[in-house]
Image (tube, grey):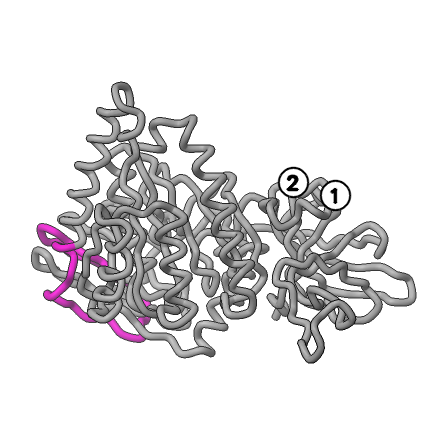
Amino acid sequence: MAYAGPIGGGGGGMVAANSSTVRQVVLEKECELRIEVAETPLKLRLLSGTAEIYGTELPPEIWLNIPPNLKFAVFTWYGATIEMDGATETDYTADETPMISYVNVHAVLEGRRNRAKANSTQEPDSSQGPRVIVVGPTDSGKSTLSRMLLSWASKQGWKPTFVDLDIGQGAITIPGCVAATPIEMPIDPVEGIPLEMPLVYYYGHTTPSVNADLYKILVKELARTLERQFSGNAEARAAGMVINTMGWIEGVGYELLLHAIDTFNADVVLVIGQEKLCSMLKKDVLKSKPNVDVVKLQKSGGVVSRNPPARKKARSHRIREYFYGLTNDLSPHSNIVSFNDLFVYRIGGGPQAPRSALPIGAEPSADPMRLVPVTINNHDLLHSVLAVSFAKEPDQIISSNVAGFICITDIDLQRKKITYLAPSAGELPSKYLIVGNLSWLET
């Protein structure tokens, strides 16, 4: 059953252009064309010179079909002519970009990878490549920088591991997950992260504040699994990892950042666009880990801020992509099963101890790790997105990664039947399902 990833192919490719709407933009060296696509697709191609989108080079003379509402930038190191066909919300040329500092970071990381590879035969302990964690406030360009560093590394022949801890948006799979996947080639500017079998743990919410303890445990499980994989793979170990984080950087969010830096043994912390955060991290991280590099980088002027409704809409699009593909090229299947065929669990909730066992006057508190069976006796699960766990027994659910996701589209209480949407036909790979508060209504 193909539950491996959220996106199918078919985003790019050659398309015909309507000459009446075609326009050309000439870019000088080290400039970028910043584009916000309108409600209709945009066709774009490289006519001359060289250019890239987020570290991935554009093929010459081939029209790319860019989906609606995408915001991106075409950058050139040496000069290029770009041709566009279609409407944009806005497009403009910028000659002030942080790309020089970004590529300088890549060069330093490249040196560390080469040293790690050289040491892999003589000194296994020093064969670990760079572990880079990208931090910063919401809409500061963390995902974009992560993609660039990964694409540049893969272009040099490395297969770095991409770790996504941003449960709010989901760069590897749907929102509500922490996930990791090796990047074997530059990331397609349209189709996004190429996926075979990503390692995914389902948190089930779009903010860690719902259950910070569970978030920490899943981050630890992900890190532990990657460590096991690295121990038997010198190539992946030398290539290192790039870790993308969420934009919550204050209070509990800051604590979770420190936890991620520690858990993944990050040795490079890239702080985008915030002096205060950089200063705090230098003080708190270097206190216990003096060998960690904390580096402040400039935020790109092309980063577009999104309001909560826009972020919610993006999450919904992301879930839809999982089932239908980026360009509706996938065919999900609707399946019907009996209530008894599925075992649904929620993580967290319920008192840790009954009142009778507590001191007088003490209130029972919720147990963040408690596994609560969900009885299907009403329509509460309708439109819920559920993760299909690889667990063999219920007590393995928290420590197990997931095979994929389904969405409940109908609940028949009389017949005791559930209808769900799945990416492919056939039986689910497991009968154990995890529910959070993530939902999706197909429109």
- Left or right side of 98 for 307: right
Would residue 397 be visible to someone looking at this image? yes
Q: Earlier in the sequence, mark 1 or mark 2?
A: 2
Check contact, mark 1 vs mark 2: CB within 8 A. Answer: yes
Place residue 135 in its image quadrant. bottom left
- For image coordinates 16% across by 43% down, the residue present is 108
Q: Amino acid at mark 2?
A: Met
Q: Is residue 230 above or below residue 260?
A: above
Which x, y percent locates residue 267?
Answer: 27, 46
- For image coordinates 30% across by 56% down, the residue present is 134
Task: Give the spatial CA distance, label 1 vs label 2.
Answer: 8 Å
Between 26 and 145, the one lying in front of the other is: 145
- For image coordinates 46% across by 58% down, the residue present is 170
User: Label 2 neighbourhood size at 10 Å, few (<14), some (14-19), many (20+)?
Assistant: few
Disc 1 target residue: 427
Which x, y percent locates residue 203?
Answer: 56, 58
Quick one: SS at disc 1? loop
Q: Is residue 348 above or below residue 16?
A: below
Range of magenta residues: 73-101
Quick one: SS at disc 2? loop
**Residue reaching furthest front?**
360
Q: Is residue 34 above or below residue 103?
A: below
User: Label 1 neighbourhood size at 10 Å, few (<14), some (14-19), many (20+)?
Assistant: few
- For image coordinates 32% across by 62% down, the residue present is 18
Image quarter where the N terminus lies is top right
- Left or right side of 221 for 242: left
Image quarter where the C terminus lies is bottom right
Q: Amino acid at mark 1?
A: Glu
Disc 2 target residue: 1
The magenta stretch spans residue 371 = no
